[in-house]
Image (tube, rainbow, N blue to C red):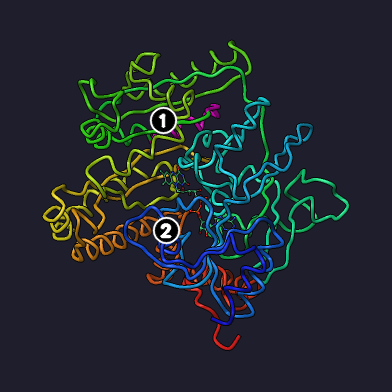
Amino acid sequence: MNGILERLRSIVSERFVKDDVYTRHAYSRNVDPVLQGVPDYVVRPRDAREVSEVMKLANELDVPVTVRGGGDCEFGGSKPVGDGGILIDMKRMDGVINIDQDNLVATVEAGISWGKLNEQLSRLGFYTGCMGPGSGMTASVGGGISHHSVGGGGCARYGACTNGLVGLEVVLPTGEIIETGSRANKHAAAPFNRFGNGPDLAGLFCGDNGILGVKTKVSLRVYPRPPCAAYKTFVMGRKSAEAAASIFAAIRHKGIDVYDAMYIMDLVVLVGSEKGLYPLWESLKKKRGIFFYTVEANSDAELDAKVKQLDDVVLTQKCEALGQEIADGNYAKWHYVEQGGWQTYHNLWGIERGGYEPLTAECFVPASKFPAILEDLDAWDGEHVQDIETILKTCGTRPVTGSGPVLLVDGCNVELTCGFTTFNAYFNGSYHPEVAEANLRLWKSILERVTSHGAQWYMMGDITSRLMVDIGAYAPGYLAALRAVKDCLDPRHVLGRGKFNFWGVPGR
Ligand SMILES: Cc1cc2nc3c(=O)[nH]c(=O)nc-3n(C[C@H](O)[C@H](O)[C@H](O)COP(=O)(O)OP(=O)(O)OC[C@H]3O[C@@H](n4cnc5c(N)ncnc54)[C@H](O)[C@@H]3O)c2cc1C
């Protein structure tokens, strides 16, 4: 095809370009079992210059390009939308470039994982505050910034990982390389601040789901990790979702400092304990909702004061504290001390027989709204009995509808991970088209239902970005402005073609 293979090889060398069937199919999926798109070429560039040359070639030949970090997107974002095109794998660019200990800024290559970065920072007594997503052992910093990720720890205190962003180096879809923030001034030797020198261009690329540019370098704030921390886990009473919403609100309204605050609904505690997902809670007599918090401080006295404030709020909601040790069920301690934040969600994939997976709807909503959404999901489940029965009949396990952990994030908002469990259509050695069709129907339906509650999606990938357009959920002015930005930066829509239904402009 237009000598593209040879030209890609001349840019990144023969070793780092693949077009064999095995490699192309290995890059054709993310973690969801439903969406697939097989690229024609997989390239692994070493630096921004090589990325830039690949983008220029893609423009010249009008070939779509998809960027992939860790490939952990749950919504089909890091594989092509439809078949074909070039896939850029960023994981070769995984170095720490500089840790500016005076200004507390770390600059890294965008393909580095949150785990690797924080491992290096921890040796100096620092961390990234928000520890990225729950997939942070493998997910990349560039992927997290492209998603506004949260969930790996620290987001009640530090917000989403984009809150700590200082600056970016970005290869624009047409191949130009820019830097944002303080580095927009060519005399600034190193990134030190995000805002200034004009509008916040870094913000344009935060949460863009890989459609406006390829992030090649990321500068993040780093923070000294405080020496003292406390972690407590509570079993809740009945109506635990409402109680958790009240606790989240009280924490914010009283201005109480907290590192993480999380609610896990009763159904998940019950089913998760039965399936071995939560061994810590197997012996709990009452499988009710669970609430936990972690809090940090610079001295024991400060810590005691913060713990008292938090306990006052939590204990007014009929919560009962579990023991201090992990073996006592203290999930909060495991989450903080043993980096459970980067492990907890992994168990959701494959906890049952092969191919068991969640299809999720992950979004930000006001804390006061999430109990009503969970209640509506129960109603949604009852309305979709036919498709649910189809999955049960073929796979032998009834899908469970509900929510994973609910996390306090910025302001009075929570991250809501809801959805349903299902099985891959490749089940027990054969393909079941009826399961594939039911999965897709149910997934689109639940995404539409949650959208109707006014949810704010942060990880949109292939499915949610297009669904928002298809169901007319975008305010027209917003979508038109986004489209104008896309047309301006990427006239042929080569980057992430198809996401948000940006399919290219004919004739350009
Ligand atoms: C077990 C598990 C737990 C998870 N927990 C969480 C969680 O707690 N919170 C959360 O937010 N998400 C979570 N996720 C989803 C996902 O892992 C994260 O959103 C993560 O930040 C994605 O990073 P990645 O490097 O894997 O990105 P990818 O999946 O490779 O890419 C994500 C998107 O960003 C784009 N992209 C990637 N790198 C770049 C780049 N350098 N430049 C431009 N665009 C780029 C891609 O095109 C794609 O659209 C979880 C996933 C799994 C499997």
Which region of the structure is painted magenta?
245-258
Give the Cα distance between marks 1 and 2: 44 Å
Residue type pointed to by label 1: Ile
Q: Do tag 1 and tag 2 residues touch (Cβ < 8 Å)?
A: no
Give the image location of residue 260, x and y in percent.
Answer: 49, 31
In the picture shown, does residue 107 fall above or below 21? above
- Judging by the rendered image, the residue that carries numbered circle 1 is 247
Q: Is the CB of the residue bearing disc 1 within 8 angstroms of ligand 1?
A: no
Q: Is residue 102 magenta?
A: no
- Judging by the rendered image, the residue that carries numbered circle 2 is 26
In the picture shown, does residue 436 fall above or below 277? below
Q: Main secondary structure of the magenta part?
A: helix
Q: Residue at x 37, y 70 (%)?
A: 471
Q: Is the CB of the residue bearing disc 2 within 8 angstroms of ligand 1?
A: no
In the picture provided, is 86 more to the left or to the right than 38?
Answer: right
Give the image location of residue 347, x and y in percent.
Answer: 34, 38
For this rendering, which residue is in front, 476 or 289? 289
In the picture provided, is 189 more to the left or to the right than 441?
Answer: right
Q: Is residue 257 magenta?
A: yes
Q: Residues within 10 Å of mark 1 (few under 14, many from 20)?
A: many
Give the image location of residue 385, x and y in percent.
Answer: 14, 57
For this rendering, which residue is in front, 315 or 501? 501
